[in-house]
Amino acid sequence: MSQSTSSTYVTAPRPDETTWIWLVKIVTGPLLIVLLIVHLIANHYVGSQPSGLMTYEDVIHYFQNPIIPAIEILFLATVVTHSLIGLRGIILDLNPSRTVLTVVNWFLSLLGVFSVAYGIWLALSIASQGR
Amino acid sequence: MDQTRNQPSARKFLSWFIPVGRQVGGWAFALSRVTAIGLTFYLFLHLYVLRLLALGPGHYDEFLKLTENPIIKLGEWAVVAAVFLHGFNGIRIVLTSFGVGVTRQKQLFYGFMIAAILVILIFTVRMY
Amino acid sequence: MVETWKITLRVYRQKENQESHFDDFQMDVNPDEYVLDAVERAWAFHDRSICFRHACHHSTCGACGMRVNGVEKLTCITPIREVTHNGATLKVEPLRNFPVVSDLAVDMGPFYRKMEAVGARAVLPVTEAEIENPPSKWDPDDSQYIRLSDCLECGLCMSACPIMATTPAYLGPAPLAAAQDQGLRRKPELLSIVDCEDGVWRCHSAFECTAVCPSFVDPGRRIMNLRTQVVDMKLRKLFGKA
Protein backbone atom coordinates (compact mmCIF):
# COMPACT_ATOMS: atom_id res chain seq x y z
CA MET A 1 0.00 0.00 0.00
CA SER A 2 1.42 3.38 -0.92
CA GLN A 3 2.49 5.39 2.11
CA SER A 4 1.51 8.92 1.24
CA THR A 5 -2.11 8.23 0.42
CA SER A 6 -2.95 5.77 3.19
CA SER A 7 -1.79 8.15 5.92
CA THR A 8 -4.56 10.61 5.09
CA TYR A 9 -7.16 7.97 5.75
CA VAL A 10 -9.58 8.21 8.59
CA THR A 11 -10.04 4.45 8.54
CA ALA A 12 -7.60 2.32 6.58
CA PRO A 13 -9.04 0.12 3.85
CA ARG A 14 -8.78 -3.61 4.34
CA PRO A 15 -7.11 -5.24 1.43
CA ASP A 16 -7.95 -8.84 0.73
CA GLU A 17 -8.29 -11.09 -2.23
CA THR A 18 -11.65 -9.45 -2.78
CA THR A 19 -11.51 -9.19 -6.55
CA TRP A 20 -11.55 -12.95 -6.80
CA ILE A 21 -14.24 -13.36 -4.17
CA TRP A 22 -16.45 -10.95 -6.05
CA LEU A 23 -15.71 -12.68 -9.35
CA VAL A 24 -16.71 -16.00 -7.83
CA LYS A 25 -19.96 -14.50 -6.61
CA ILE A 26 -20.80 -12.91 -9.92
CA VAL A 27 -19.95 -16.05 -11.87
CA THR A 28 -21.88 -18.35 -9.55
CA GLY A 29 -24.93 -16.11 -10.00
CA PRO A 30 -25.72 -16.88 -13.64
CA LEU A 31 -24.40 -20.43 -13.19
CA LEU A 32 -26.99 -20.85 -10.47
CA ILE A 33 -29.74 -19.73 -12.81
CA VAL A 34 -28.82 -22.51 -15.22
CA LEU A 35 -28.44 -25.13 -12.50
CA LEU A 36 -31.63 -24.03 -10.80
CA ILE A 37 -33.59 -24.49 -14.01
CA VAL A 38 -32.11 -27.97 -14.38
CA HIS A 39 -32.90 -28.77 -10.74
CA LEU A 40 -36.48 -27.54 -11.03
CA ILE A 41 -37.18 -29.31 -14.31
CA ALA A 42 -35.71 -32.48 -12.89
CA ASN A 43 -37.72 -32.34 -9.71
CA HIS A 44 -41.00 -31.44 -11.26
CA TYR A 45 -41.06 -33.01 -14.66
CA VAL A 46 -39.43 -36.40 -14.37
CA GLY A 47 -40.34 -39.27 -12.15
CA SER A 48 -43.27 -41.61 -12.07
CA GLN A 49 -45.94 -38.97 -11.80
CA PRO A 50 -46.66 -35.97 -13.99
CA SER A 51 -45.86 -33.57 -11.19
CA GLY A 52 -42.36 -34.90 -10.75
CA LEU A 53 -40.52 -36.54 -7.89
CA MET A 54 -43.30 -36.95 -5.43
CA THR A 55 -42.30 -39.90 -3.26
CA TYR A 56 -39.29 -41.46 -1.64
CA GLU A 57 -39.28 -44.18 -4.28
CA ASP A 58 -39.18 -41.62 -7.06
CA VAL A 59 -36.14 -39.88 -5.58
CA ILE A 60 -34.21 -43.10 -5.03
CA HIS A 61 -34.89 -44.25 -8.54
CA TYR A 62 -33.97 -40.87 -9.98
CA PHE A 63 -30.62 -40.90 -8.22
CA GLN A 64 -29.56 -44.17 -9.81
CA ASN A 65 -28.31 -42.41 -12.89
CA PRO A 66 -24.83 -41.20 -11.78
CA ILE A 67 -25.09 -37.91 -13.60
CA ILE A 68 -27.91 -36.85 -11.28
CA PRO A 69 -25.96 -36.83 -8.00
CA ALA A 70 -23.13 -35.15 -9.90
CA ILE A 71 -25.37 -32.29 -11.05
CA GLU A 72 -27.02 -31.98 -7.66
CA ILE A 73 -23.67 -31.77 -5.90
CA LEU A 74 -22.48 -29.16 -8.38
CA PHE A 75 -25.68 -27.23 -7.77
CA LEU A 76 -25.18 -27.48 -4.01
CA ALA A 77 -21.59 -26.30 -4.13
CA THR A 78 -22.53 -23.37 -6.35
CA VAL A 79 -25.48 -22.24 -4.29
CA VAL A 80 -23.65 -22.60 -0.97
CA THR A 81 -20.71 -20.61 -2.32
CA HIS A 82 -22.92 -17.86 -3.69
CA SER A 83 -25.05 -17.69 -0.57
CA LEU A 84 -22.19 -17.61 1.93
CA ILE A 85 -20.16 -15.06 -0.04
CA GLY A 86 -23.28 -12.91 -0.16
CA LEU A 87 -23.81 -13.33 3.56
CA ARG A 88 -20.21 -12.30 4.14
CA GLY A 89 -20.87 -9.17 2.06
CA ILE A 90 -23.83 -8.26 4.23
CA ILE A 91 -21.70 -8.68 7.34
CA LEU A 92 -18.94 -6.54 5.81
CA ASP A 93 -21.51 -3.79 5.28
CA LEU A 94 -21.87 -3.68 9.06
CA ASN A 95 -18.24 -2.62 9.45
CA PRO A 96 -16.96 -5.49 11.61
CA SER A 97 -13.54 -5.29 13.24
CA ARG A 98 -10.62 -7.29 11.90
CA THR A 99 -11.06 -9.92 14.62
CA VAL A 100 -14.77 -10.34 14.07
CA LEU A 101 -14.17 -10.61 10.32
CA THR A 102 -11.57 -13.34 10.80
CA VAL A 103 -14.01 -15.30 12.94
CA VAL A 104 -16.75 -14.78 10.36
CA ASN A 105 -14.45 -15.89 7.52
CA TRP A 106 -13.57 -19.08 9.36
CA PHE A 107 -17.14 -19.81 10.36
CA LEU A 108 -18.53 -19.32 6.87
CA SER A 109 -15.74 -21.34 5.25
CA LEU A 110 -16.28 -24.24 7.63
CA LEU A 111 -20.05 -24.01 7.18
CA GLY A 112 -19.58 -24.10 3.43
CA VAL A 113 -17.24 -27.06 3.46
CA PHE A 114 -19.45 -28.92 5.90
CA SER A 115 -22.59 -28.26 3.86
CA VAL A 116 -21.05 -29.55 0.67
CA ALA A 117 -19.59 -32.57 2.43
CA TYR A 118 -23.00 -33.28 3.93
CA GLY A 119 -24.53 -32.95 0.49
CA ILE A 120 -22.09 -35.40 -1.04
CA TRP A 121 -22.78 -37.88 1.75
CA LEU A 122 -26.52 -37.42 1.30
CA ALA A 123 -26.41 -37.86 -2.45
CA LEU A 124 -24.33 -41.00 -2.21
CA SER A 125 -26.49 -42.34 0.57
CA ILE A 126 -29.65 -41.84 -1.48
CA ALA A 127 -28.10 -43.36 -4.56
CA SER A 128 -26.93 -46.39 -2.62
CA GLN A 129 -30.39 -47.10 -1.25
CA GLY A 130 -31.52 -48.15 -4.67
CA ARG A 131 -29.46 -51.26 -4.69
CA MET B 1 -23.11 14.81 22.61
CA ASP B 2 -25.45 14.46 19.74
CA GLN B 3 -22.84 15.04 17.08
CA THR B 4 -22.45 11.33 16.65
CA ARG B 5 -26.09 10.77 15.86
CA ASN B 6 -25.95 11.37 12.16
CA GLN B 7 -22.88 9.20 11.70
CA PRO B 8 -22.75 5.89 9.86
CA SER B 9 -23.25 3.00 12.23
CA ALA B 10 -23.99 -0.69 11.98
CA ARG B 11 -27.23 -0.15 13.86
CA LYS B 12 -28.56 1.67 10.84
CA PHE B 13 -28.85 -1.62 8.99
CA LEU B 14 -32.61 -1.26 9.27
CA SER B 15 -32.34 1.65 6.86
CA TRP B 16 -31.37 -0.90 4.21
CA PHE B 17 -34.85 -2.38 4.35
CA ILE B 18 -36.85 0.82 4.82
CA PRO B 19 -35.84 2.94 1.84
CA VAL B 20 -37.05 6.27 3.17
CA GLY B 21 -36.07 9.21 1.00
CA ARG B 22 -34.58 6.84 -1.54
CA GLN B 23 -35.39 6.19 -5.12
CA VAL B 24 -35.96 3.02 -7.07
CA GLY B 25 -32.37 1.86 -6.67
CA GLY B 26 -32.81 1.84 -2.92
CA TRP B 27 -35.79 -0.48 -3.35
CA ALA B 28 -33.83 -2.75 -5.66
CA PHE B 29 -31.10 -2.99 -3.03
CA ALA B 30 -33.59 -3.69 -0.24
CA LEU B 31 -35.39 -6.33 -2.32
CA SER B 32 -32.22 -8.15 -3.24
CA ARG B 33 -31.01 -8.12 0.33
CA VAL B 34 -34.27 -9.36 1.85
CA THR B 35 -34.63 -12.16 -0.70
CA ALA B 36 -30.97 -13.12 -0.20
CA ILE B 37 -31.42 -13.52 3.55
CA GLY B 38 -34.72 -15.35 3.10
CA LEU B 39 -33.31 -17.72 0.52
CA THR B 40 -30.29 -18.47 2.70
CA PHE B 41 -32.61 -19.55 5.51
CA TYR B 42 -34.55 -21.66 3.06
CA LEU B 43 -31.39 -23.24 1.66
CA PHE B 44 -30.19 -24.56 5.00
CA LEU B 45 -33.68 -25.58 6.04
CA HIS B 46 -34.07 -27.51 2.78
CA LEU B 47 -30.73 -29.22 3.23
CA TYR B 48 -31.66 -30.21 6.77
CA VAL B 49 -35.02 -31.61 5.75
CA LEU B 50 -33.55 -33.68 2.96
CA ARG B 51 -31.65 -35.84 5.44
CA LEU B 52 -34.96 -37.66 5.83
CA LEU B 53 -34.24 -39.27 2.50
CA ALA B 54 -31.22 -41.00 3.95
CA LEU B 55 -33.20 -42.50 6.81
CA GLY B 56 -34.91 -44.99 4.59
CA PRO B 57 -38.43 -45.36 3.27
CA GLY B 58 -41.27 -43.93 5.26
CA HIS B 59 -39.67 -40.87 6.81
CA TYR B 60 -39.59 -38.78 3.68
CA ASP B 61 -43.09 -39.71 2.61
CA GLU B 62 -44.32 -38.83 6.11
CA PHE B 63 -42.71 -35.46 5.74
CA LEU B 64 -44.25 -34.92 2.31
CA LYS B 65 -47.69 -35.22 3.90
CA LEU B 66 -46.77 -32.24 6.08
CA THR B 67 -46.13 -30.16 3.02
CA GLU B 68 -49.78 -30.26 2.14
CA ASN B 69 -50.31 -27.71 4.91
CA PRO B 70 -51.42 -24.39 3.34
CA ILE B 71 -48.85 -22.42 5.31
CA ILE B 72 -46.11 -24.58 3.82
CA LYS B 73 -47.66 -24.08 0.40
CA LEU B 74 -47.52 -20.32 0.94
CA GLY B 75 -43.92 -20.67 2.03
CA GLU B 76 -43.10 -22.59 -1.13
CA TRP B 77 -44.67 -19.85 -3.21
CA ALA B 78 -42.66 -17.26 -1.30
CA VAL B 79 -39.48 -19.14 -2.12
CA VAL B 80 -40.34 -19.21 -5.82
CA ALA B 81 -41.14 -15.50 -5.79
CA ALA B 82 -37.93 -14.71 -3.90
CA VAL B 83 -35.87 -16.74 -6.37
CA PHE B 84 -37.18 -14.84 -9.36
CA LEU B 85 -36.97 -11.42 -7.75
CA HIS B 86 -33.45 -12.05 -6.52
CA GLY B 87 -32.37 -13.74 -9.74
CA PHE B 88 -33.65 -11.08 -12.12
CA ASN B 89 -32.24 -8.28 -9.98
CA GLY B 90 -29.00 -10.23 -9.99
CA ILE B 91 -28.94 -10.32 -13.77
CA ARG B 92 -29.31 -6.54 -13.72
CA ILE B 93 -26.29 -6.35 -11.38
CA VAL B 94 -24.22 -8.66 -13.57
CA LEU B 95 -25.04 -6.58 -16.62
CA THR B 96 -24.24 -3.23 -15.03
CA SER B 97 -21.08 -4.61 -13.42
CA PHE B 98 -19.74 -5.33 -16.85
CA GLY B 99 -20.81 -1.96 -18.17
CA VAL B 100 -23.84 -3.13 -20.12
CA GLY B 101 -26.85 -0.85 -19.84
CA VAL B 102 -25.42 1.28 -17.03
CA THR B 103 -26.85 4.48 -18.40
CA ARG B 104 -30.27 2.87 -18.47
CA GLN B 105 -30.07 0.93 -15.27
CA LYS B 106 -33.37 2.23 -13.93
CA GLN B 107 -35.25 0.97 -16.97
CA LEU B 108 -33.34 -2.29 -16.66
CA PHE B 109 -34.60 -2.68 -13.13
CA TYR B 110 -38.22 -1.92 -14.04
CA GLY B 111 -38.02 -4.25 -17.01
CA PHE B 112 -36.59 -7.10 -14.99
CA MET B 113 -39.08 -6.67 -12.18
CA ILE B 114 -42.00 -6.75 -14.59
CA ALA B 115 -40.52 -9.88 -16.13
CA ALA B 116 -40.10 -11.37 -12.66
CA ILE B 117 -43.70 -10.60 -11.71
CA LEU B 118 -44.92 -12.17 -14.95
CA VAL B 119 -42.91 -15.31 -14.36
CA ILE B 120 -44.10 -15.50 -10.76
CA LEU B 121 -47.69 -15.23 -11.95
CA ILE B 122 -47.15 -18.03 -14.43
CA PHE B 123 -45.65 -20.17 -11.71
CA THR B 124 -48.47 -19.38 -9.32
CA VAL B 125 -51.01 -20.57 -11.82
CA ARG B 126 -49.08 -23.76 -12.45
CA MET B 127 -48.48 -24.42 -8.78
CA TYR B 128 -52.08 -24.07 -7.67
CA MET C 1 -47.70 39.88 -10.35
CA VAL C 2 -45.31 37.44 -8.78
CA GLU C 3 -46.94 34.26 -7.53
CA THR C 4 -46.80 33.86 -3.76
CA TRP C 5 -47.19 30.67 -1.80
CA LYS C 6 -47.68 30.26 1.91
CA ILE C 7 -45.55 27.40 3.14
CA THR C 8 -44.29 26.04 6.44
CA LEU C 9 -40.54 25.63 6.40
CA ARG C 10 -39.65 22.86 8.83
CA VAL C 11 -35.99 23.13 9.74
CA TYR C 12 -33.95 20.52 11.60
CA ARG C 13 -32.29 22.13 14.58
CA GLN C 14 -29.49 20.66 16.57
CA LYS C 15 -27.01 22.55 18.65
CA GLU C 16 -24.22 21.09 20.73
CA ASN C 17 -25.32 19.30 23.89
CA GLN C 18 -28.97 19.57 22.97
CA GLU C 19 -31.57 17.20 21.63
CA SER C 20 -32.52 17.75 18.02
CA HIS C 21 -35.93 19.10 17.09
CA PHE C 22 -37.71 20.78 14.19
CA ASP C 23 -38.63 24.47 14.04
CA ASP C 24 -41.52 25.58 11.88
CA PHE C 25 -41.47 28.92 10.09
CA GLN C 26 -44.55 30.23 8.29
CA MET C 27 -43.37 32.03 5.20
CA ASP C 28 -44.55 33.67 2.02
CA VAL C 29 -42.35 32.55 -0.84
CA ASN C 30 -42.13 32.87 -4.56
CA PRO C 31 -42.35 29.23 -5.73
CA ASP C 32 -39.84 29.84 -8.50
CA GLU C 33 -37.22 30.74 -5.94
CA TYR C 34 -35.04 28.01 -4.56
CA VAL C 35 -35.14 26.05 -1.33
CA LEU C 36 -31.89 27.71 -0.29
CA ASP C 37 -33.58 31.10 -0.63
CA ALA C 38 -36.30 29.98 1.74
CA VAL C 39 -33.75 28.79 4.30
CA GLU C 40 -31.88 32.07 3.98
CA ARG C 41 -35.06 34.01 4.48
CA ALA C 42 -35.86 32.02 7.61
CA TRP C 43 -32.38 32.83 8.87
CA ALA C 44 -32.55 36.52 7.93
CA PHE C 45 -36.04 37.38 9.15
CA HIS C 46 -37.02 34.73 11.66
CA ASP C 47 -34.10 33.11 13.47
CA ARG C 48 -30.52 34.26 13.17
CA SER C 49 -29.26 31.16 14.96
CA ILE C 50 -29.98 28.82 12.05
CA CYS C 51 -26.70 27.44 10.82
CA PHE C 52 -26.34 26.32 7.21
CA ARG C 53 -23.74 26.34 4.44
CA HIS C 54 -24.02 28.17 1.17
CA ALA C 55 -21.66 29.97 -1.17
CA CYS C 56 -21.97 30.20 -4.91
CA HIS C 57 -25.73 29.74 -5.32
CA HIS C 58 -25.21 28.28 -8.77
CA SER C 59 -24.32 24.58 -8.27
CA THR C 60 -20.57 24.97 -8.57
CA CYS C 61 -19.29 24.88 -5.00
CA GLY C 62 -21.31 21.99 -3.56
CA ALA C 63 -21.81 23.68 -0.17
CA CYS C 64 -25.61 23.71 0.08
CA GLY C 65 -26.45 20.01 -0.04
CA MET C 66 -29.35 19.09 2.26
CA ARG C 67 -32.22 16.64 2.47
CA VAL C 68 -35.42 18.25 1.26
CA ASN C 69 -38.50 16.24 2.30
CA GLY C 70 -36.14 13.37 2.94
CA VAL C 71 -34.42 13.38 -0.45
CA GLU C 72 -30.92 14.69 -1.09
CA LYS C 73 -30.90 17.87 -3.11
CA LEU C 74 -28.59 20.75 -3.97
CA THR C 75 -30.81 23.44 -2.53
CA CYS C 76 -29.55 26.35 -4.64
CA ILE C 77 -30.96 24.77 -7.77
CA THR C 78 -34.05 23.11 -6.33
CA PRO C 79 -37.06 25.33 -7.04
CA ILE C 80 -39.62 25.40 -4.25
CA ARG C 81 -42.25 24.57 -6.84
CA GLU C 82 -40.59 21.21 -7.42
CA VAL C 83 -40.74 19.99 -3.85
CA THR C 84 -43.91 21.31 -2.28
CA HIS C 85 -47.16 23.12 -3.02
CA ASN C 86 -49.08 26.08 -1.73
CA GLY C 87 -50.10 25.67 1.88
CA ALA C 88 -47.86 22.65 2.48
CA THR C 89 -44.75 21.92 4.50
CA LEU C 90 -41.18 21.95 3.26
CA LYS C 91 -38.85 19.94 5.46
CA VAL C 92 -35.09 20.52 5.38
CA GLU C 93 -32.63 18.29 7.17
CA PRO C 94 -28.87 17.87 7.04
CA LEU C 95 -27.22 15.18 4.90
CA ARG C 96 -27.19 11.62 6.22
CA ASN C 97 -24.05 9.84 7.31
CA PHE C 98 -22.11 12.94 8.33
CA PRO C 99 -21.86 14.14 11.94
CA VAL C 100 -23.96 17.23 12.46
CA VAL C 101 -21.96 20.30 13.48
CA SER C 102 -24.92 22.62 13.88
CA ASP C 103 -28.44 22.48 12.45
CA LEU C 104 -28.03 21.94 8.72
CA ALA C 105 -24.25 22.08 8.57
CA VAL C 106 -22.38 18.77 8.75
CA ASP C 107 -18.75 17.80 9.19
CA MET C 108 -17.41 17.05 5.73
CA GLY C 109 -13.85 16.46 6.99
CA PRO C 110 -13.63 12.66 6.64
CA PHE C 111 -15.17 12.91 3.19
CA TYR C 112 -12.66 15.50 2.00
CA ARG C 113 -9.85 13.39 3.39
CA LYS C 114 -11.05 10.44 1.35
CA MET C 115 -11.18 12.60 -1.78
CA GLU C 116 -7.63 13.70 -1.06
CA ALA C 117 -6.50 10.14 -0.48
CA VAL C 118 -7.55 9.17 -4.00
CA GLY C 119 -6.05 12.34 -5.42
CA ALA C 120 -9.35 13.68 -6.74
CA ARG C 121 -8.72 16.28 -9.38
CA ALA C 122 -10.66 19.52 -9.39
CA VAL C 123 -9.38 20.45 -12.81
CA LEU C 124 -8.25 18.10 -15.51
CA PRO C 125 -7.04 18.39 -19.07
CA VAL C 126 -9.94 18.34 -21.48
CA THR C 127 -8.28 15.43 -23.30
CA GLU C 128 -8.83 13.31 -20.20
CA ALA C 129 -12.28 14.51 -19.35
CA GLU C 130 -15.44 12.69 -20.37
CA ILE C 131 -17.17 15.11 -22.66
CA GLU C 132 -19.87 14.75 -25.25
CA ASN C 133 -18.69 14.22 -28.80
CA PRO C 134 -14.95 14.29 -28.24
CA PRO C 135 -12.82 14.34 -31.40
CA SER C 136 -11.73 10.89 -32.53
CA LYS C 137 -8.13 12.00 -32.05
CA TRP C 138 -7.02 14.87 -29.88
CA ASP C 139 -4.53 17.40 -31.15
CA PRO C 140 -1.48 17.32 -28.79
CA ASP C 141 -1.97 21.05 -28.22
CA ASP C 142 -5.44 20.40 -26.85
CA SER C 143 -4.11 19.06 -23.54
CA GLN C 144 -3.32 22.65 -22.52
CA TYR C 145 -7.06 23.23 -22.23
CA ILE C 146 -8.43 22.34 -18.86
CA ARG C 147 -11.87 21.67 -17.54
CA LEU C 148 -13.45 21.71 -14.12
CA SER C 149 -14.24 18.27 -12.83
CA ASP C 150 -17.94 17.45 -12.80
CA CYS C 151 -17.83 16.44 -9.15
CA LEU C 152 -18.70 19.28 -6.77
CA GLU C 153 -17.78 17.25 -3.69
CA CYS C 154 -21.21 18.14 -2.35
CA GLY C 155 -21.64 14.83 -0.54
CA LEU C 156 -25.18 14.09 -1.73
CA CYS C 157 -24.09 10.70 -3.00
CA MET C 158 -22.47 9.83 0.32
CA SER C 159 -25.73 10.65 2.04
CA ALA C 160 -27.87 8.58 -0.31
CA CYS C 161 -25.69 5.47 -0.40
CA PRO C 162 -27.21 2.64 1.72
CA ILE C 163 -23.75 1.25 2.47
CA MET C 164 -22.43 4.60 3.74
CA ALA C 165 -25.23 4.44 6.28
CA THR C 166 -23.78 1.43 8.04
CA THR C 167 -20.05 1.69 7.57
CA PRO C 168 -17.80 4.74 7.65
CA ALA C 169 -14.96 2.60 6.35
CA TYR C 170 -16.47 2.41 2.89
CA LEU C 171 -14.74 4.78 0.49
CA GLY C 172 -18.01 5.96 -0.94
CA PRO C 173 -19.33 6.90 -4.37
CA ALA C 174 -17.56 10.25 -4.83
CA PRO C 175 -14.04 9.06 -3.94
CA LEU C 176 -14.47 5.97 -6.09
CA ALA C 177 -15.74 8.08 -8.97
CA ALA C 178 -12.74 10.37 -8.53
CA ALA C 179 -10.44 7.36 -8.68
CA GLN C 180 -12.15 6.09 -11.82
CA ASP C 181 -11.81 9.51 -13.34
CA GLN C 182 -8.05 9.27 -13.13
CA GLY C 183 -7.85 5.74 -14.41
CA LEU C 184 -5.94 2.88 -12.81
CA ARG C 185 -3.66 2.48 -15.80
CA ARG C 186 -2.52 6.06 -15.43
CA LYS C 187 -2.27 5.92 -11.63
CA PRO C 188 -1.63 2.31 -10.58
CA GLU C 189 -0.96 3.35 -6.99
CA LEU C 190 -4.72 3.79 -6.65
CA LEU C 191 -5.23 0.06 -7.12
CA SER C 192 -4.50 -0.90 -3.54
CA ILE C 193 -6.87 1.79 -2.28
CA VAL C 194 -9.86 0.82 -4.36
CA ASP C 195 -9.29 -2.91 -4.66
CA CYS C 196 -10.30 -3.86 -1.17
CA GLU C 197 -13.35 -4.71 0.83
CA ASP C 198 -14.07 -1.13 1.71
CA GLY C 199 -13.40 0.09 -1.78
CA VAL C 200 -15.00 -0.76 -5.04
CA TRP C 201 -16.31 -4.17 -3.88
CA ARG C 202 -18.51 -2.75 -1.17
CA CYS C 203 -20.94 -1.29 -3.70
CA HIS C 204 -24.22 -3.18 -4.18
CA SER C 205 -25.43 -1.43 -7.32
CA ALA C 206 -28.24 0.48 -5.66
CA PHE C 207 -27.36 3.46 -7.90
CA GLU C 208 -28.81 5.85 -5.35
CA CYS C 209 -25.67 7.93 -5.79
CA THR C 210 -26.36 8.42 -9.49
CA ALA C 211 -29.99 9.23 -8.73
CA VAL C 212 -29.14 12.18 -6.46
CA CYS C 213 -25.99 13.54 -8.08
CA PRO C 214 -26.73 17.12 -9.21
CA SER C 215 -23.73 17.29 -11.48
CA PHE C 216 -23.91 14.41 -13.95
CA VAL C 217 -21.02 12.55 -12.40
CA ASP C 218 -22.99 9.25 -12.49
CA PRO C 219 -20.88 7.66 -9.73
CA GLY C 220 -22.71 4.34 -10.14
CA ARG C 221 -21.53 3.93 -13.69
CA ARG C 222 -18.03 5.00 -12.71
CA ILE C 223 -17.83 2.46 -9.91
CA MET C 224 -18.90 -0.28 -12.31
CA ASN C 225 -16.27 0.88 -14.76
CA LEU C 226 -13.68 1.02 -11.99
CA ARG C 227 -14.43 -2.62 -11.22
CA THR C 228 -13.61 -3.62 -14.76
CA GLN C 229 -10.42 -1.55 -14.48
CA VAL C 230 -9.45 -3.41 -11.28
CA VAL C 231 -10.13 -6.81 -12.83
CA ASP C 232 -8.15 -5.72 -15.87
CA MET C 233 -5.17 -4.67 -13.73
CA LYS C 234 -5.27 -7.87 -11.70
CA LEU C 235 -5.44 -10.08 -14.75
CA ARG C 236 -2.52 -8.23 -16.21
CA LYS C 237 -0.52 -8.77 -13.04
CA LEU C 238 -1.48 -12.42 -13.04
CA PHE C 239 -0.25 -12.89 -16.56
CA GLY C 240 2.79 -10.70 -15.94
CA LYS C 241 1.96 -7.94 -18.34
CA ALA C 242 1.65 -5.07 -15.83
Image (cartoon, coloured by chain):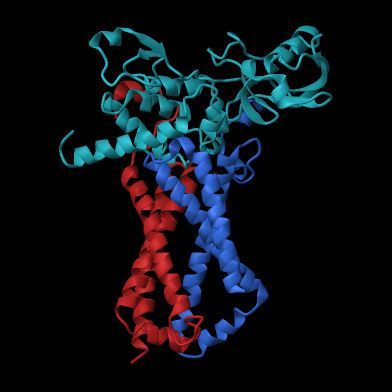
The image shows residue A68, relative to residue B11, as above or below, that is below
**Chain painted blue:** B
Image point 51% across, 75% down: which residue?
B49
Image point 62% across, 80% down: which residue?
B68
Residue C29's quadrant in the figure?
top right
Evaluate whether residue B121 shows in this view. Answer: yes
Image point 43% across, 65% down: which residue?
A36
Q: Quadrant of the N terminus of chain C?
A: top right
Q: Nearer the viewer, residue C122 or B8?
A: C122
The image shows residue A40, relative to residue C229, as above or below, that is below
The image shows residue C39, relative to residue C69, as above or below, that is above
Q: Is residue C10 left or right of residue C200?
A: right
Q: Nearer the viewer, residue C226 or A100?
A: C226
Q: Quadrant of the C terminus of chain C?
A: top left
Q: Position of residue A3 (x, y in %)?
A: 30, 23
Residue C20's quadrant in the figure?
top right
Q: Nearer the viewer, residue C152 or C109?
A: C152
Q: Position of residue B108 (x, y in %)?
A: 50, 44
Residue C81's quadrant in the figure?
top right
Q: Count how many numbered circles sit on residues in the image.
A: 0
Evaluate whether residue B10 shows in this view. Answer: no
Q: Position of residue A16 (x, y in %)?
A: 33, 42
Q: Position of residue C89 (x, y in %)?
A: 79, 26
Image point 52% across, 45% down: which residue?
B109
**Chain painted cyan:** C
What hue represents chain A? Answer: red
